[in-house]
Image (cartoon, grey):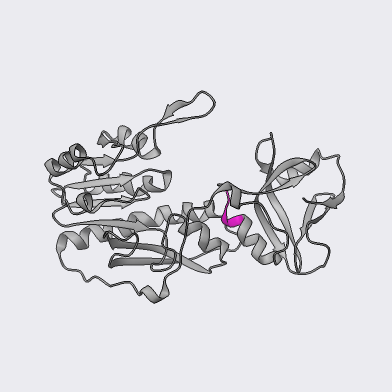
């Protein structure tokens, strides 16, 4: 299938394993990603991970400000693509996703119709799901609603963070992308409509919504903290500083005022409703991320108190 004309669209690191392997197996004609953005104190322009990988692979790159720009659409038409592969990218207008001769498909990080939206991995962890997976579907105008081509499921390991799960799913994206491309190219496939009665949302998560409420069941609090890690990261106030908790376990035993903390040797516990959490990785304001046991080696502050 080396004669297939494939255009790949994506932005973050999540897209990279599939990008590289699809190019090796089928060849990618062009990559579409976001424009370089100013980052850091110096506001230096930074390319997306997909752009950097495409440069390494020698693939032609497009970075349109708007996907509906007529000049960009014309450029895509000139390519005469067979398939658009979309993994962790922007919402495509119909004028764009209808260009390929065969189809435009998206690899979505959930078992659709569950978790439609920008943050399916986060919400699967936050909601305590035991299983999740990937779905490939044909793009249509309403976001994440297209007919399903393939699905691949996996069990979510206990105490996984969103970052952990993302790393696992991005590796799984390679096989499901291959299989979807081969099915579409063969023409021998069946599409399955989504059951709209079973939908659930997965809206984007912002830092201001990640302040920890200690008035949650310890299990639910564990899920929330791990579900927004590493970004944006769950946070609380401790000794007048912002403390991010980036990984934790929980225990449903014990009872104390929610938010009360106890530090005993190498153990740091913070009570919630019906039990407590034990932070495993933290980041104190102005400090680097570190394992809690390493932080406690040099800790000389209060051993008991209450989070704000």
Count how many numbered circles sit on residues in the image. 0
Position above or below: 223 against 167: below
Q: Splitting the image into 4 quarters, where does residue 290 fall? A: top right
Residue 32 sits inside the magenta stretch = no
Task: Where is residue 45? Give x, y as percent.
Answer: 42, 27
| Residue occupying the point 30% across, 46% down | 9
| Residue occupying the point 67% across, 66% down | 219
| Residue occupying the point 32% across, 44% down | 20
In the rendered structure, the answer to whether residue 186 lies left or right of residue 287 reads left
Dominant SS type (magenta): loop
| Residue occupying the point 42% across, 44% down | 13
Task: Where is residue 53? Give x, y as percent.
Answer: 35, 37
Position above or below: 153 against 295: below
Task: Where is residue 286? Give x, y as percent.
Answer: 69, 33
In the rendered structure, the answer to whether residue 205 lies left or right of residue 218 reads left
Q: Give the range drawn in magenta.
A: 226-230
Q: Splitting the image into 4 quarters, where does residue 299 fall? A: top right
């Amino acid at each position: 299938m080396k004669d297939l004309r494939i255009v790949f669209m994506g932005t973050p690191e999540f897209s990279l394993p599939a990008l590289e392997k699809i190019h090796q197996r089928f060849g990618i004609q062009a990559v579409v990603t976001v424009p370089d953005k100013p980052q850091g104190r110096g506001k230096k322009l930074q390319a997306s991970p997909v752009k950097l990988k495409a440069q390494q692979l020698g693939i032609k790159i497009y970075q349109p400000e708007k996907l509906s720009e007529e000049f960009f659409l014309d450029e895509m038409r000139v390519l005469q693509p067979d398939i658009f592969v979309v993994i962790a990218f922007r919402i495509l207008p119909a004028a764009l996703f209808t260009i390929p001769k065969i189809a435009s498909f998206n690899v979505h990080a959930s078992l659709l119709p569950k978790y439609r939206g920008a943050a399916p991995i986060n919400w699967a962890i936050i909601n305590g799901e035991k299983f999740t997976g990937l779905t490939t579907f044909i793009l249509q105008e309403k976001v994440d609603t297209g007919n399903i081509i393939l699905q691949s499921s996996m069990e979510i390991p206990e105490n996984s963070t969103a970052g952990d799960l993302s790393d696992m799913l991005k590796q799984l994206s390679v096989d499901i992308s291959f299989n979807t491309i081969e099915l579409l190219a063969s023409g021998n496939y069946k599409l399955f409509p989504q059951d709209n009665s079973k939908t659930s949302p997965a809206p984007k998560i912002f830092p201001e919504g990640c302040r920890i409420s200690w008035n949650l069941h310890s299990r639910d609090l564990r899920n929330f903290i791990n579900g927004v890690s590493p970004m944006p990261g769950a946070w609380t106030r401790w000794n007048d500083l912002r403390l991010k908790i980036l990984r934790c376990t929980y225990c449903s035993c014990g009872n104390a005022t929610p938010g009360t903390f106890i530090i005993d040797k190498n153990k740091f516990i913070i009570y919630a409703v019906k039990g407590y959490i034990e932070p495993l990785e933290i980041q104190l304001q102005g400090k680097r991320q570190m394992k809690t046991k390493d932080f406690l080696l040099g800790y000389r502050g209060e051993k008991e108190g209450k989070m704000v």
